[in-house]
Image (cartoon, helix red, strand yellow):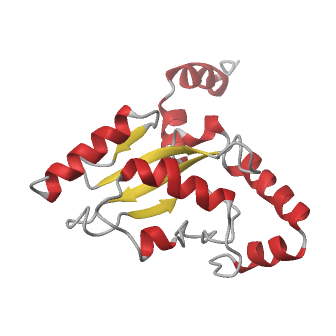
């Protein structure tokens, strides 16, 4: 690869040709969302997360920034910001890795093998170490509440604007508001 921009294009195309839904934020190739499914054989199975990816100018020499958009209960993911604590992305990134590695290897491994000794979510880490069954139940509750496949496609603000623009809703609600004419 001769330049970081060609490599960025190639990696992004490779990711798009995989089975991942990729949604670009702007016309550039530096920021996008990817729908990520929880690995089977884990309490995250059945959940779908929207992952925000930002590629730095120096990608692939510098690691991408990865964050969960919808909530996930995990010791190594900050519950509020969605930031991920993952050595391979934060410290040991190599240009040999690509975006497909992030979604086919690194994130599934993170969900399958949480590291409670280096937490971003202290409550999740403590619960996991204290009561693994209760931890897995909480993970499943979060999956059901925040990571349903049908909810991941639209951000909350998009949903509300879709509802506002529905002409069917307007037609029926206009008639109800007009009501009967005064006698």
Q: Quadrant of the C terminus?
A: top right
Q: Is residue 65 visible?
A: yes
Residue at 69% from the left image edge and 81% from the top image edge? 117
> Is residue 51 depicted above or below 181 in this figure?
below
Q: How many marks?
A: 0
Residue 174 image offset from top left, x and y in percent: 58, 24
> Is residue 181 depicted above or below 140 in this figure?
above
Snapshot quadrant of residue 71: bottom right
Tell me: 180 left or right of 26.
Answer: right
Residue 69 image offset from top left, x and y in percent: 53, 57
Q: Given the current orientation, which residue lies at the most extreme left position? A: 2
Residue 23 image offset from top left, x and y in percent: 38, 41
Q: Is residue 69 visible?
A: no
> Is residue 7 depicted above or below 22 in this figure?
below
> Is residue 82 depicted above or below 140 in this figure?
below
Residue at 51% from the left image edge and 52% from the top image edge? 105
Snapshot quadrant of residue 109: bottom right
Residue at 23% from the left image edge and 44% from the top image edge? 10
Tell me: 150 left or right of 155.
Answer: right
Residue 110 image offset from top left, x and y in percent: 60, 61
Residue at 60% from the left image edge and 68% from the top image edge? 77
């Amino acid at each position: 690869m001769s330049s970081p921009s060609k490599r960025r294009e190639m990696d992004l195309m490779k990711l798009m040709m995989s089975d991942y839904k990729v949604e670009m934020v702007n016309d550039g190739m530096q920021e996008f969302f990817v729908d990520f499914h929880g690995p089977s054989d884990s309490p995250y199975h059945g959940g779908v997360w929207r992952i925000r990816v930002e590629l730095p100018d120096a990608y692939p020499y510098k690691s991408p920034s990865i964050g969960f958009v919808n909530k996930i209960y995990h010791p190594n993911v900050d519950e509020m910001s969605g930031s991920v604590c993952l050595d391979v992305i934060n410290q040991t990134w190599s240009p040999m890795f690509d975006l497909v590695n992030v979604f086919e290897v690194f994130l599934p491994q993170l969900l399958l093998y949480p590291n409670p000794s280096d937490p971003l979510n202290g409550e999740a880490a403590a619960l996991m170490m204290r009561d693994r069954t209760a931890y897995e139940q909480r993970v499943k509750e979060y999956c059901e509440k925040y990571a349903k496949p049908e909810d991941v496609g639209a951000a909350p603000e998009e949903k509300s604007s879709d509802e506002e623009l529905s002409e069917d809703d307007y037609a029926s609600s206009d008639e109800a508001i007009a009501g009967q004419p005064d006698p």
